[in-house]
Every structure is written in structure tokens, then in C-alpha cells.
Image (cartoon, rainbow, N blue to C red):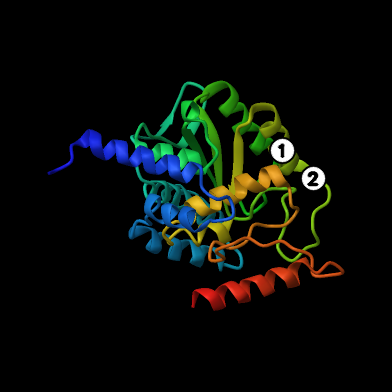
Amino acid sequence: MSMSQNDYVKQVLEALEVLKNRDPNDTSDIALLASYLYTAIPELSEHLSKLKKFVDLNKPTQDDIQKAGYLLEEIALLSFCGLSGYTSLKSFRSPSSQYDLVIGGDTVEWKSICDLLYIEFNQRDIVVEAKATTEKLSDSQFARLCCIMSYNLTNTSLGVFFTLNGASGFPEEGKARQQKIGNSRLRQVVFHAATKKAIVVFDKYDILTLDQNGSLITLLIRKIRDLCELTGKPNAPVEEFVEVDLPESPSRLKQLYEEICIRQNTVTS
């Protein structure tokens, strides 16, 4: 006997409820769900190759930077079009601001994405800004998006910057753990504390991984989680299934974790 559409919807909702009550230590289901909810569009790889060529330029001209800006906007569009369930996709100039991309959905799939990204469904839109400057994103640029999300696009609860070199005050790879916050990072933290809305920043290294299925959702989850944790370290690459941030000495936490991983791999193999 064939199932009706209502039966399918009921089963999906029941499955989502199971995921909501999952074991917090088991992330395998989330990784699998992320790969279904974000499927990289084939054209994205070509655009990322162009971005890589720009990144490798020693002295980009103003014309190169302008072209990179348009390229970042296209990459942002292609990336978010890889998400399942969106029903609204807009890039427009309003009476007050220019919006590079505003995306949202009214579907079961989009609700699943909202659940993964800690987004309330009544504020389920995402606003994306592309900034192809050679400098880090400034505090004033960050403040502008905070203002837009507070007073203009009030149905948004997540903002995403596509940048080349990240934002001022954020942890950097290869540097000591950040113990103090300032500049754009401080703005991000204060805005989240005041509004419960998150703004995250993608740099060129993040963007160049977006041709992997599930990567966009994985990046967003990790960056939003870190906004609450403030580990002071950059996020782990999306290729790493589990983020691990454990001290090597004098504590034995990292050694114990490695021993657990070896034992678990031995059992499952």
C-alpha cells in the first residue's frame, strides 16, 4: 500500500524528533544529515578555482579586487543554493541597504537546517555579505550588519560574512590561544549576548572547502558553537570529523582521548 504525502511528512517529523533527542556524544547522525542537507553545486568548484588564483596573486590590482568581490558574491549564492528546502532567495537594494543575499525556507528540510544551526524557526532567514577586501573585516563593517539584523531584516537570526582574510580580533591559525577579545570579535560576542542572533565569518580557507558535501553546515555549526564557547582557537577543518581541543601537558586528557580512539577503531574494524 502506497504512502500518502501526509504519511511521509509524519515520518520525517518523527525522525527529526529522534535526532533532537539523540545522544549528544554521537555526532555521526549529524554529519550524515549535513551531507544530505548541503550538496555542493558542481559549478562551485570552477568558481573556487578562480578564487584560488586570485588568492595566489602577489599584488592584486584594484580591478582584480573588484572582480574578486563579484566572484565572492557568486560563490556565496552557489553555496547557499546547495542547501535543501529554501523557498526564498533574494539579492536586492532596499530603501536603506544593499543586500548581497537573503535566504530562507518554509519547509521541513529548512527546519532541520535551523535545528542544526541553533536557529529559532520564527526567525529563520539568513543574510550573507561578501567582502573582498585585502584587509581584515573592520569593526564598523561588522557593526553595520548588526544594525541591519536588528532593525531592518528582523526575521534573520544568522548573518554570514564571506571574506578573504577574516575579521579583526578573531583567533588566527598558528598563534597562541586568544585570551582577550576586541575589535570585530568583541562586537560579535556582544551582539550575540544582546540579541541571541549570530554573525559568523568565513575566510578564504573556509570558502575553499565549500565544494564538499555537508561542509557549509559543518562550518556554520562550528562557528556558531565557538561563539558561545570562545575557545580562543580557530575552528578545526571540516575534514576533521570531530573537533578536539585538549591540552597535551601536564594533563593526560589528550593522551587518554587518543587511547579511546584507538580502542574504538579496533572494536569497529
State the residue at coordinates (58%, 50%).
24
Q: Which mark is residue 189?
A: 1
- Tell me residue 57's x, y (percent): 56, 67
Residues 264 and 73: in front is: 264
Left or right, 243 with respect to 43, comes to: right
State the residue at coordinates (61%, 68%).
58
Residue kind at label 1, given as amino acid type? Val
- Tell me residue 98's x, y (percent): 49, 31
Left or right, 216 with respect to 178, comes to: left
Dots 1, 2 in contact, CB < 8 A: yes
Measured along the vertical axis of the image, is residue 65 above or below residue 108? below
Instruction: Name the N-terminal-most of marks 1 and 2.
Output: 2
The residue beneath circle 2 is: 181
- Tell me residue 65's x, y (percent): 54, 54
Quadrant of the rendering where the N terminus is positioned: top left
Q: Which mark is residue 82?
A: none
